[in-house]
Amino acid sequence: MLKFFRKIRFDLMEKNKTGKYLKYAIGEVVLVMIGILLALQVNDWNEQRKDRIKEQVVLRQLQEDYQANLAQLEEKMTTRKRIISSALKALKAFDQPVGANRDSLIKNLGNAFHDPTFDPIENDLTSSDNLILVRNPKLKRLLSNWSSDVVGVREIEVTWSEYVNGHFDQILSDLGLGRDVSNSFMNDSEHLWLLDRNEESFKVEIGTSKLGAPVNEIVTSRKLEGILGSAITLNKAANMQSEALSNRIQEILDLIESEIKE
């Protein structure tokens, strides 16, 4: 092809047909430019095709991760509801101490001793390079804001966890209930956080203490009453934040679903 064009140019120059040669030269430049533009267009199309393939891979992985995050979050919310319910039942013993059952009270304290924390999957799929691949602007914004959305839940969780491992634990120890509550916690409570869901393997018979406080002493402990109140307020607040986060995850999953190509 190049030899063909050279021959035409040579013939026109040899025959001194300057006008025709100039027209031909301009035409040749135009053809070359069109060829370059077409090549660039093909290359751009090819790069876009590669980006769409990469986007689908990222979206499918994000879908899997956020489904796992949603399942975990729902488990934490279920545990918190049990904490709230058990704390309310324990407080009834404070309000109506006559006839209060010590075993039931210990079991409720054991259920309230949980401190669920949401630990979402962390990966680099929401890094700037991968976010560039996501074309849906709303989805991209939600993914960018994900870390800050989680903070609202974690802040309350950390506060309650500090109460459990600091104040609550110390109060139970002062009342001589540490062994009793630990025994109930391990053997009577549900533990949704176990990875293998094998609650039987978690159970250990610690037994009950002969040194523990009687019912009348337990239900007159101002510190224990206060910690039970905190159990309700903090876990209720954490669940309200978690509900909002759950809706956010579902919104992300719906948008991902709409962008995934079968």
Image (cartoon, rainbow, N blue to C red):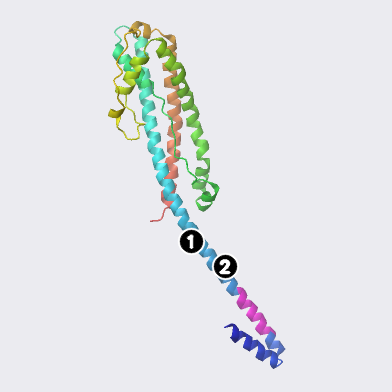
Q: Is residue 76 magenta?
A: no
Name the magenta segment's main secondary structure: helix
Residue depicted at x 48% and y 61%: 49
Q: Which residues are magenta?
A: 22-33
* Res 50 seen here: yes
* Res 188 seen here: no
Residue depicted at x 45% and y 57%: 53
Q: Is residue 28 magenta?
A: yes
Residue depicted at x 62% and y 74%: 33
Badge 1 local density, few (<14 within 10 Å), some, or many (20+)? few
Which numbered dot is residue 253?
none
The residue that label 1 is drawn on is 49
Quadrant showing the C terminus: bottom left
The residue that label 2 is drawn on is 40
Q: Which element type, helix, strand or loop, lies under badge 2?
A: helix
Q: Residue furthest bottom?
A: 15
Q: Quadrant of residue 74?
A: top left
